[in-house]
Image (cartoon, grey):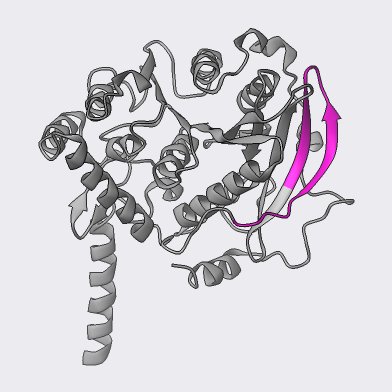
């Protein structure tokens, strides 16, 4: 009986300790967040101060997400099929392995006419109904392709064609970070892509994927996290804050600092007046801008705030991204006409079909995925 009670106590202690390491959802009130940000600002007053802080934060993300062994530039052998010719761009269906038996699925958009190496954009999506198949994702990917970029839109785990496990498995953040890195591998290895001009942009949970990947992977040249960077809200899903990336033995951080780890490279924060980004112009943006000033790069970070809009990647937010990306990547803003970007039916964008089935080695079910992830640190 005593041994049983001891085991129960140890289990409950482990659960409580793990929870204490997590900052989830609206962890602070906006008022508490302001105090937290003031305290964080005291930790760095120079480029050297911030570089040390940023290195600690990035190390903490790798440790907390259990991706210390994750390296870039894995050779990707992708299956690309079902090419569709559109007005100024093409769309293809793609899948490839990120881990043995785990497949990243998505759509590849390209301009129909280009010469030499061209920029690329990685396009994670947020939570919602249609996700990769929805109008917001299709419109932005197609339009960016018309502007002259190669664009890859890929599924969150448990959504779209990536149905090998549920979305809210405990290490969802770990697997999505691995998938994002391999998606970047895929993009950067395409022969037409200029490896020095790769951007990443997503909204909400895709915004979290954006700033986490941008912090960890030096190949990202431009970052556009949409309606997500907040100092008091840490993401409402396991895939964003279900692992201890914010609280480590030596420090505690926020998503604002994680986003700022991208300094001094170009970053656009897009915010609105109806969610946790409503304070961005007065709170989060000035804090990040100060960090950029340590590098004499204050002009490289921008904020487009839409106070009358809600939490989405709608037309005004997409326009802000088009303008920023055209400036930073050299895309053709004159081609940013969304009326030319067609929303295709889901069945045309579906990756797995009779001719291209899910590979026989694919892992199936949460237990199989979890067992694999336990072997990776």
Q: Residue 49 at x, y = what percent?
A: 17, 41
Magenta run includes residue 88: yes
Q: In this view, does 145 lie to the left or right of 202?
A: right
Q: Residue 37 at x, y = what percent?
A: 17, 33
User: Is 337 drawn above or below residue 210 in the view shown?
Assistant: above
Q: Residue at x 58, y 44 (%)?
A: 184
- Please give the range of residues in magenta: 74-94
Let me know if residue 116 appears in the view.
Answer: yes
User: Is 88 drawn above or below residue 250 in the view shown?
Assistant: above
Q: In this view, does 160 lie to the left or right of 177?
A: right
Magenta run includes residue 7: no
In-front residue for pair 49/284? 49
As drawn, the residue found furthest toward the front would be 116
Q: Which residue is drawn at 45% across and 46% down?
A: 217
Question: Would you identify the image quadrant in which residue 76 lies?
Answer: bottom right
Task: Decide whether the magenta segment is chiefly helix, strand or loop.
Answer: strand
Q: Is residue 289 left or right of residue 240?
A: left
Quadrant in which the N terminus appears = bottom left
Q: Residue at x 78, y 61 (%)?
A: 359
Let me know if residue 301 appears in the view.
Answer: no
Q: Residue 51 at x, y = what percent?
A: 25, 43
As drawn, the residue found furthest toward the right would be 355
Q: Residue 69 at x, y = what percent?
A: 45, 64
Question: Would you identify the image quadrant in which residue 144 lies?
Answer: top right
Q: In this view, does 362 lie to the left or right of 165?
A: right
User: Is 265 drawn above or below residue 353 in the view shown?
Assistant: above
In-front residue for pair 225/291? 291
């Amino acid at each position: 009986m005593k041994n049983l009670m001891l085991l129960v106590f140890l289990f409950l202690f482990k659960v409580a300790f793990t929870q204490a390491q997590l900052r989830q959802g609206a962890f602070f009130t906006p008022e508490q967040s302001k105090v937290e940000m003031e305290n964080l600002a005291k930790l760095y007053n120079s480029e050297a101060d911030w570089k040390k802080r940023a290195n600690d934060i990035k190390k903490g993300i790798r440790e907390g997400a259990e991706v210390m062994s994750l390296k870039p530039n894995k050779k990707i052998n992708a299956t690309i099929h079902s090419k569709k010719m559109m007005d100024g761009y093409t769309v293809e269906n793609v899948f490839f392995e990120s881990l043995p038996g785990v497949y990243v699925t998505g759509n590849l958009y390209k301009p129909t006419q280009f010469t030499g190496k061209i920029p690329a954009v990685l396009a994670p999506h947020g939570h919602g109904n249609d996700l990769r198949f929805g109008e917001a994702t299709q419109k932005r990917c197609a339009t960016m392709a018309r502007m002259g970029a190669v664009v890859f839109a890929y599924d969150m785990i448990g959504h779209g064609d990536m149905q090998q496990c549920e979305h809210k498995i405990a290490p969802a953040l770990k697997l999505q970070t691995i998938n994002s890195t391999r998606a970047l591998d895929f993009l950067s290895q395409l022969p037409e892509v200029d490896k020095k001009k790769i951007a990443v942009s997503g909204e909400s949970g895709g915004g979290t994927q954006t700033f986490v990947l941008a912090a960890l992977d030096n190949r990202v040249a431009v970052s556009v996290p949409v309606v997500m960077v907040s100092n008091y809200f840490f993401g409402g899903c396991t895939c964003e804050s279900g692992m201890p990336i914010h609280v480590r033995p030596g420090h505690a951080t926020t998503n604002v600092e994680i986003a700022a780890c991208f300094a001094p490279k170009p970053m656009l924060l897009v915010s609105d007046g109806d969610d946790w980004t409503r304070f961005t112009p007065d709170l989060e943006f000035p804090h990040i801008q100060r960090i950029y000033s340590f590098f004499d790069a204050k002009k490289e970070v921008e904020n487009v705030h839409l106070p009358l809009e809600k939490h989405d990647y709608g037309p005004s937010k997409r326009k802000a991204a088009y303008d920023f990306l055209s400036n930073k990547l050299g895309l053709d803003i004159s081609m940013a006409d969304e009326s030319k970007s067609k929303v295709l039916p889901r069945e045309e964008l579906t990756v797995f079909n009779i001719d291209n089935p899910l590979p026989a080695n694919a892992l199936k079910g949460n237990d199989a995925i979890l067992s694999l992830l336990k072997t990776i640190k």
